[in-house]
Image (cartoon, rainbow, N blue to C red):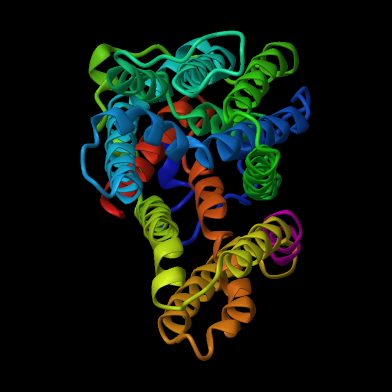
């Protein structure tokens, strides 16, 4: 079914003939009883607030966990190195577990709906953040976990990964409730909410650090936000997509990879999703050390750069992309975005400590490049019928996770 449906809708590279006035397309496009998109956008924002707050605090947790095992004389530096190594292993466990279940999460959402799958993903974050909080020093109510903390965090990170990538059901739900005209803009709104939420979460963690209070508060705040997301999803999300059963064979992490090659357009969109995820993860994982080591950038300057990056990305995703799509179309916007990303990487490599101030000028190109991923995903959703959207997002999540593992 997917092959025959897609053959009418994306026969050329970067060309999706979705505006043909066929009966099948008209039925696919009409969403008269679709719920509003704001709960999905709010879910993206809140999730990334909690994620940003936690990301800024994870190294603190790791330092407390590994410090009893460090015996070197230069304890401070040795603890930092050991914490970085331990944190890298935690990330690897989380990514591998997420890779294993990404496809299952997708097909499960096709059968059971997007809501329960999103609730499970948020529950995984609640468990993860609560256990991480308990590994930090107590502020007087519940004691600190010391014995076995090393293994407890591997368990918590694994649970968060196994219960699924929240974007699988979030993007599937957004595609379900959107027409083909609305989908690119709404995916961009999700991306804008993501970067804005990460910025807000980072500010929350920074406020905790400046206040000199226990870093437990960062994780407890993140936990409370994820509990709030669960309530939001249960109350405000409404599944409208047709259901599709699955076999256990389809839960194989790579079972739906064939969907990514349904036609030439889908293959190209999939390649763009992988490349944009790979480049973003590689850039973000080395940005701090590169700016400090090679560009001699101090902490306040780097913080200002990151703040500008997130705000520009939010503007590009929430305002610039919808305007460009209306004026020049999705394909031209996608090509322009990817070109901006390429030019940015070339110019960034040419920076030196003497001309590093130019990074504030060229960062707008990287922000424009952030359009690539949500736009490519939204175009890919057009190539498949509604009952396969979960499987598609599962396959996209596998692509993302592989890129996340390889890039660093």
Q: Which residue lies at the image location 71% right of the left edge and 45% below the top edge?
A: 182
317 magenta-colored: yes
Q: Which residue lies at the image location 29% right of the left edge and 20% below the top edge?
A: 251
| Relative to 314, residue 93 above or below | above
Q: Where is residue 15 in the image (x, y as percent from the top left)?
A: 49, 60
- Quarter of the image for the N terminus: give it: top left
Q: Quadrant of residue 359?
A: bottom right
122 magenta-colored: no
| Relative to 213, residue 334 above or below | below
Q: Which of 372 and 182 is in front in this view?
A: 372
Q: Where is residue 17 in the image (x, y as percent from the top left)?
A: 54, 54
| Relative to 263, residue 342 above or below | below
Q: Where is residue 232 in the image (x, y as percent from the top left)?
A: 72, 18
| Relative to 132, residue 297 above or below | below
Q: Which of 163 and 147 is in front in this view?
A: 147
Q: Where is residue 227 in the image (x, y as percent from the top left)?
A: 64, 15
| Residue 256 visible in the snapshot | no
Is 325 situated left or right of 96 in this image?
right
Is 177 situated left or right of 249 in this image?
right
Q: Nearer the viewer, residue 8 or 388?
A: 388
Q: How many numbered callouts?
A: 0
Q: Give the range drawn in magenta.
A: 316-325
| Residue 83 visible in the snapshot | yes
**In the current view of this chain or complex, which residue is farthest to the bottom?**
354
Q: Quadrant of residue 394?
A: top left
């Amino acid at each position: 079914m997917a092959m025959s449906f897609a053959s009418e809708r994306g026969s050329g590279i970067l060309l999706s003939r979705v505006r043909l006035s066929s009966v099948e397309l008209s039925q696919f496009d009409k969403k008269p009883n679709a719920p509003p998109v704001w709960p999905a956008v709010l879910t993206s924002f809140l999730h990334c607030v909690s994620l940003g707050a936690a990301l800024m605090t994870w190294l603190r947790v790791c330092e407390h966990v590994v410090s009893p095992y460090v015996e070197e004389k230069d304890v401070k530096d040795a603890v930092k190195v050991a914490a970085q190594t331990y944190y890298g292993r935690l990330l690897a466990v989380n990514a591998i577990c997420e890779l294993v279940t990404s496809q299952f999460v997708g097909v499960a959402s096709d059968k059971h709906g997007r809501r329960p799958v999103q609730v499970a993903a948020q529950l995984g974050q609640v468990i993860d953040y609560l256990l991480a909080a308990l590994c930090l020093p107590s502020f007087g109510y519940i004691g600190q976990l010391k014995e076995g903390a090393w293994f407890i965090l591997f368990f918590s990170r694994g649970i968060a990964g196994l219960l699924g990538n929240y974007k699988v059901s979030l993007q599937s739900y957004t595609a379900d409730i959107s027409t083909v005209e609305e989908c690119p803009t709404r995916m961009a709104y999700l991306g804008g909410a993501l970067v804005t939420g990460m910025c807000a979460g980072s500010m929350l963690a920074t406020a905790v650090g400046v206040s000199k209070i226990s870093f437990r508060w960062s994780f407890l705040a993140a936990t409370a936000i994820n509990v709030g997301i669960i309530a939001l999803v249960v109350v405000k999300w409404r599944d409208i997509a047709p259901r599709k059963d699955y076999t256990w064979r389809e839960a194989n992490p790579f079972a739906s990879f064939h969907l990514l090659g349904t036609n030439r357009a889908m293959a190209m969109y999939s390649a763009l999703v992988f490349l944009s995820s790979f480049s973003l993860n590689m850039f973000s994982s080395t940005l701090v050390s590169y700016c400090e080591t090679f560009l001699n950038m101090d902490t306040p300057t780097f913080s200002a750069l990151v703040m500008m990056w997130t705000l520009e990305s939010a503007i590009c995703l929430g305002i610039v992309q919808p305007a460009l799509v209306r004026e020049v179309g999705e394909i031209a916007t996608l090509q322009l975005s990817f070109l901006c990303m390429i030019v940015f990487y070339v110019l960034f490599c040419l920076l030196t400590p003497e001309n590093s101030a130019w990074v504030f000028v060229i960062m707008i190109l990287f922000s424009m490049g952030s359009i690539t991923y949500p736009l490519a995903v939204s175009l890919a959703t057009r190539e498949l019928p509604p009952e396969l959207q979960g499987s598609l997002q599962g396959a996209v999540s596998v692509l993302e996770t592989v890129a996340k593992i390889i890039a660093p």
